[in-house]
Every structure is written in C-alpha cells, then in structure tokens.
Image (cartoon, rainbow, N blue to C red):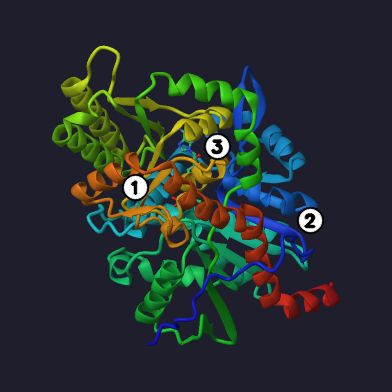
C-alpha cells in the first residue's frame, strides 16, 4: 500500500463553527466533576482545553455532553437521579459506572494496556479477558447513551482511546449517523499497535466514524498503515474505504485558548507573583509542568539536570529547576512507582548539591490554578517540555501564549506532537541525557535577542491555530463529508 504524502494538516476555513446541527460530544469524563457533600450533589466545572474549545458549539447548538461525572455508582448511591438532573440542566448526561467497571475499563484496559501501546511501549502487561470484557461493555453503555439521545441532523464527536469501539457500535444501530472521532494520544508504529490483543477490533471500532482525526500527519499515516496491514481495507488518498463509505483520516493539531492565557499574563496578580517567584537575583529558573506520567520524561529531565550540576559546577547556586507534577492515575501501579522514583531522584539531587539559600530542585506534587500557572510560565527563563512521547502537549503552547514579553527559551522533546509545529524551539531527543544537558546549556546561555526572535516565531504559530479553530476545522470537515446525509435525514424527519 502507498501511504499518500498529501496528509497535510487540514486548515480550518473560518473561526466560526457552521451551524451544522446539534453536537453530541462523547468523552470518558464530563467537563464537570460531581461531588456528594453533606448529602447533596455539587457540580464543579472544569476549564480543560477540550471543555473550553467545545463550550461554544455545545451551548450554541443545544448539544449534549455525554460522559462519566467522576463519581462511581457506589459513591453517588441514592443521589444518582438528582445528579443526572443537575447534569441535564447543564447540557450533560452522566454514564453510571461502578467501581468494578472503572477498575477494568479505565484502570486496567485503557490506562494499563492501551495507553502504553499508544505511546509505543510494548513492555506492557497483556490485558486480562475481564478487563477487555469491561472495556467492551462500557463502550456499549456509552454507545447506548448516544443512540437514546440521537435526533435527525445531529453530529456526534467521540473523543479518545477509552472509547475506540463507540463509533462502530453506534454505526451498527444508526447507519446514517454523522460521527467524528479524535484521538488525543499519538498513534504508534503499526507493529507496536499490533502487539496489543484486540488491536484489530479497536481499529475496526474507529472505522465506524466518518472522520478520524489525529494531532499530526505522522499519526494519521501510521493509522492508515495499521488499517491496511491488519484489516486489509483499501486506502484511497487520505480515505479508508469500508463498503460504500469513505472515511476521512486527517491531522487536526489541537491548540489552546490563546486569548485567555495572553489576558491572564497581563493581570496584576500575575505580575506580583512573578516578582515573588523570581526572588533571588542571579538564579536562572528552569520549569517543568506535567501530569505525573511516565510518558512525560520527568525522570529523564531530572537526571540531565543532575548531570549538568555534576559536570558544570559553575551552575551550582545559579540555576533552579522547579518541577510541578499534577497527580494522575494513582490507582495504576506504574504511576505509583513513577511517583516514588521521581521523589527519590529529587531527594538525591537536593541531598548532593543543596546549600544554604539554594535548593536545586523545587518539586511540587499537586495542581495549581490558572493565575499561579501563568505566573510560573512568566517567571521561567527556560521551559522544559521533554516528553518521551506525547500526542500534542499543550503545556508547550501555554508557555508560549503566556510570554507576551517574548522572553524565555523553550526546550521541546522532538517526539511531542507539538514539535511538528513549534520548530523554533530548541528541539531535543528526550532520551539522550547528554543531548538534554547540551540543550540546557544552550537555553540558559541564550541571548535576549535570540529568545525574542524564536519566541516571536512560536507565538505566531500558536496564535494562528487556537482551540476554537481546531474545533471548527474538525467539525467543518465532518459537515462537508456528511452534508448529503444530513439533508436527507432532515427531509425524512
Ligand atoms: P495530557 O497528557 O493530560 O492529555 P497535556 O497536553 O500535557 O495533556 O496538557 C496537560 C494540561 O494539564 C495542561 O493544560 C496543563 O496546564 C495542565 N497541568 C499540568 N500540570 C498541572 C498542574 N500541576 N497544575 C495545573 N494544571 C496542570 C492528552 C494527551 C496530550 C494532548 C492532550 C490534548 O496526552 O498529548 O496534548 O490530551 O489533546
């Protein structure tokens, strides 16, 4: 099979999202978290990238967001109906999941088996039959929730690796539905993907969609190769042929809410916090901000920092690495081990090099709000975004959007999806410790003139493709692909 060279990112045609029908968004988690407090239900809205990007089209079209509300059925207990009512008022529908289902579907299959393979790690434990059965059953539950609410003319947009069977399950029952799917992770080498038990069923699950989107052209190409190798489906240009259907596979690089970061960076509270953070003059600040995940390269980054201090004593007392790690998937063993490992390395570096008035690594395990995050980005001289593999990595884009002062240097791992766009960062192989150390030196010694030139280039790219354009671009492609079907559905009522 020849993979077309024409898999270029599809540029969105406009900022506005065409009124192409109601949007049913389907994601593992809802953009709000429910909590039971003193016998009543509380709803907390999330401001994550996906929620921000899709908020407009969701509310403008009277859409429904379908997903898990963050509470097991055991935790919700008798309050589940009340919770569903609050969600419904907010344009959402909650999928009830028990602790057992969450353990099998989410922790063991999605995060224990599928996530590592999608990041090209083949040393993963094989999923057990029970975990796969629960993944299937929960995907069926999501599909059922979509089918129950589907009306003629609706669009369905399914998100991410937890729900790869949903497009096929909906298609089987609703052959004329208009379905898009977006994968937020990388798509790996087809041979890595083939090591996963049930790889073929997962690929086939995705082929229920009309449009399948990835962050980069490379992921889209690998997906087409996997479909050709494993399912022997014909490929024409960027399309997969399944019977009479043509499925569009394309790159839609996700952006962030650039205007919000830019505006936040100008807030007086941020300025005050930046002054405080910069503290001691003459100490350069390096920064890492990540979910605590083994794909983010946190240990490798710390080891390179240790090597910098060991081999270049002139930096001792003159540089500090601030690492912020947001807790993640603590019920999966690999994540608990990673947390212990990172803490050990931090303690070892601080134990070996700290002196009165200077701590080499400042490590924080927790989440911060947007004001604190933007202040950290603004106070940094060097931003380290060095994942081993990453679908996109929005932190790199957030850093750039926060730097209206055009200062600071970005060290970016070449295997993050963002590296396809952010070419004027300092690109580095995140697994090569010496290369990382060299990039730290280059970043720390970069002149302000060079920082400005590079940052201008980066800001141009980030501003040109924000999260609203990303959503509009994907939905416009889905609309143009399915326009005839929509017209027919509306005529037939
Ligand atoms: P993640 O791997 O979670 O998601 P990433 O792109 O790294 O996503 O973004 C993480 C988000 O969490 C950023 O918005 C960042 O600001 C925030 N964050 C991180 N640490 C934080 C902290 N301590 N406190 C507060 N906020 C923090 C997946 C894929 C990515 C892909 C995204 C979007 O793995 O590759 O970019 O989805 O598609």
Question: Does label 2 or label 3 sit earlier along the sequence?
Answer: 2
Q: Secondary structure at mark 3?
A: loop
Label placed on residue 386: 1
Camera-side residue: 132 or 270? Answer: 270
The CA distance from mark 1 to mark 2 is: 39 Å
Where 365 sits versus 53, above or below? Answer: above
Q: Secondary structure at mark 1?
A: loop
Where 490 sits versus 279, above or below? Answer: below
Picture quadrant of residue 466 = bottom right
Q: Secondary structure at mark 2?
A: loop
How many discs appear? 3
In the rendered image, the quadrant that contains the C terminus is bottom right
Q: Identify the residue at horizontal 74%, vertical 77% (top origin).
A: 483
**To which residue does mark 2 refer?**
61
Closer to viewer: mark 2 or mark 3: 2
Query: Within 10 Å of the Cα at label 3, are there few (<14), some (14-19), or many (20+) other Cα atoms?
Result: many
Question: Does label 1 or label 3 sit earlier along the sequence?
Answer: 3
Question: Does label 1 or label 2 sit earlier along the sequence?
Answer: 2
Q: Identify the residue at horizontal 36%, vertical 67% (top origin).
A: 199
The CA distance from mark 2 to mark 3 is: 25 Å
- Locate residue 155, reporting x and y percent: 70, 64
- Locate residue 344, reporting x and y percent: 21, 28
In the rendered image, the quadrant that contains the N terminus is bottom left
- Locate residue 413, reporting x and y percent: 34, 52
């Amino acid at each position: 099979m020849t993979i077309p060279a024409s898999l270029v990112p599809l540029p969105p045609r406009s900022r506005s999202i065409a009124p192409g029908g109601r949007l049913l968004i389907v994601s593992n988690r809802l953009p709000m978290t429910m909590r039971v407090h003193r016998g009543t239900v509380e709803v907390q809205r999330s401001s994550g990238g996906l929620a921000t990007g899709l908020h407009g089209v969701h509310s403008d079209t009277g859409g429904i967001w379908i997903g898990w509300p963050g509470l097991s059925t055991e935790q919700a207990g008798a309050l589940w109906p009340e919770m569903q009512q609050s969600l419904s008022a907010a344009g959402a529908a909650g999928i009830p999941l028990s602790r057992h289902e969450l353990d099998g579907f989410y922790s063991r299959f999605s995060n224990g088996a599928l996530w590592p393979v999608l990041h090209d790690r083949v040393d993963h434990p094989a999923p057990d039959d029970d975990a796969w059965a629960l993944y299937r059953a929960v995907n069926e539950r999501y599909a059922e929730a979509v089918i129950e609410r589907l009306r003629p003319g609706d669009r369905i947009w399914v998100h991410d690796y937890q729900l790869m069977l949903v497009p096929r399950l909906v298609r089987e029952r609703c052959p004329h539905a208009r379905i898009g799917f977006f994968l937020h992770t990388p798509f790996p080498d087809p041979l890595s993907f083939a090591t996963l038990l049930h790889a073929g069923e997962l690929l086939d699950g995705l082929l229920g969609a009309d449009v399948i989107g990835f962050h980069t052209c490379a992921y889209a190409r690998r997906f087409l190769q996997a479909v050709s190798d494993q399912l022997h489906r014909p490929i024409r240009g960027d399309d997969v042929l399944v019977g009479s259907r043509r499925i569009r596979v394309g790159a839609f690089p996700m952006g962030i809410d650039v205007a919000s970061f830019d505006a936040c960076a100008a807030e007086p509270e941020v300025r005050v916090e930046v002054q405080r953070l910069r503290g001691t003059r003459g100490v350069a600040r390096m920064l890492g901000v990540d979910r605590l995940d083994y794909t983010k390269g946190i240990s490798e980054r710390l080891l390179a920092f240790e090597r910098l201090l060991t081999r270049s004593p002139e930096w001792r007392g003159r540089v500090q690495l601030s690492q912020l790690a947001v807790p993640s998937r603590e019920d999966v063993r690999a994540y608990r081990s990673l947390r212990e490992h990172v803490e050990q390395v931090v303690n070892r570096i601080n134990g070996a090099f700290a002196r009165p008035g200077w701590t080499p690594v400042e490590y924080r395990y927790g989440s911060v709000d947007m004001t604190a995050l933007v202040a950290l980005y603004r106070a940094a001289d060097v931003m380290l975004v060095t994942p081993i593999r990453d679908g996109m990595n929005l932190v790199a884009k957030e850093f750039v959007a926060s730097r209206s002062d055009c200062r600071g240097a970005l060290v970016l791992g070449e295997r993050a999806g963002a590296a396809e766009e952010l070419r004027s960062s300092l690109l580095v192989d995140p697994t090569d410790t010496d290369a990382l150390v060299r990039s730290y030196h280059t970043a720390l010694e970069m002149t302000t003139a060079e920082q400005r030139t590079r940052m201008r280039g980066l800001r141009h790219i980030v501003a040109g493709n924000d999260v609203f354009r990303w959503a509009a671009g994907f939905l416009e492609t889905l609309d143009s692909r399915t326009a005839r079907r929509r017209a027919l559905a509306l005529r037939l009522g």
